[in-house]
Amino acid sequence: MPEKETLERAEKDRREGKSPSTQAGEFVREEMDHIREGKHGARSTKQAIAIGLSKARRAGVKLPPPKSGTTSSSTREHAARDYRRGRRRTRKKSSTRARATRRALRREGGRAASRSALARQARSASRRRSARSRSRAAKKAAATRRKRRS
């Protein structure tokens, strides 16, 4: 279950009209904090991000599953399941399954949330994007900064 503050921050982002990926970023941030605090670990940075996105979808963030060709079919199916879960009333979580997941994650290390691991992940993710796409994102960010300053 996401923390109250995370839900509030994501809700604030939604009210401000920010994109679903920005709203989901709050859940990913929470996940990184949990790993850094030693609450649990993750095998890789990618897994830590995936856990955060899954939580976001289940919390009702309108973040659709990735398109085919970008990820494996099992990842897409899981994301679709989480997305549907976020659309309906919540049921009580299975404590047995939750405990099993927590125990498995506790066995993993904490390096996945280190600054260097996150930087490496960001670099490799940006490499997969075209130069045009990266340039457009940078221009958009600059325009947003300009708007905020004035």
Image (cartoon, rainbow, N blue to C red):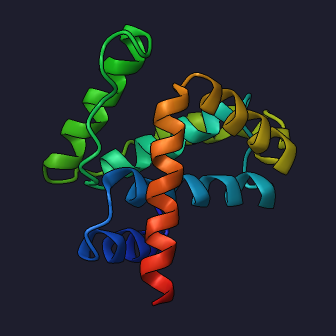
Image spot of residue 80 (x, y percent) = 26, 28
Q: How many marks?
A: 0
Can you say whether 71 is above or below 34 in the image?
above
The residue nearer to you, when weighing 56 against 92, is 56
Residue 1 can be seen in this image: no
Image spot of residue 113 (x, y percent) = 76, 46
Image spot of residue 121 (x, y percent) = 71, 34
Can you say whether 29 is above or below 148 in the image?
above
Residue 81 can be seen in this image: yes
Residue at 23% from the left image edge and 41% from the top image edge: 85
* Picture quadrant where residue 16 is located: bottom left
The residue nearer to you, when weighing 22 against 145, is 145
Left or right? Give the position of 78 relative to 150. Answer: left
The residue nearer to you, when weighing 92 against 79, is 79
Quadrant where the image shows the C terminus: bottom left
Residue at 30% from the left image edge and 36% from the top image edge: 82
* Picture quadrant where residue 54 is located: top left
Left or right? Give the position of 113 relative to 80. Answer: right
Residue at 69% from the left image edge and 27% from the top image edge: 124
- The single residue placed furthest to the bottom in the displayed view is 150
Quadrant where the image shows the N terminus: bottom left
Left or right? Give the position of 22 relative to 115. Answer: left
Can you say whether 132 is above or below 136 in the image?
above
Residue at 52% from the left image edge and 25% from the top image edge: 130
Image spot of residue 51 (x, y percent) = 53, 40
Left or right? Give the position of 98 relative to 111. Answer: left
Can you say whether 73 is above or below 26 in the image?
above
* Picture quadrant where residue 70 is located: top left
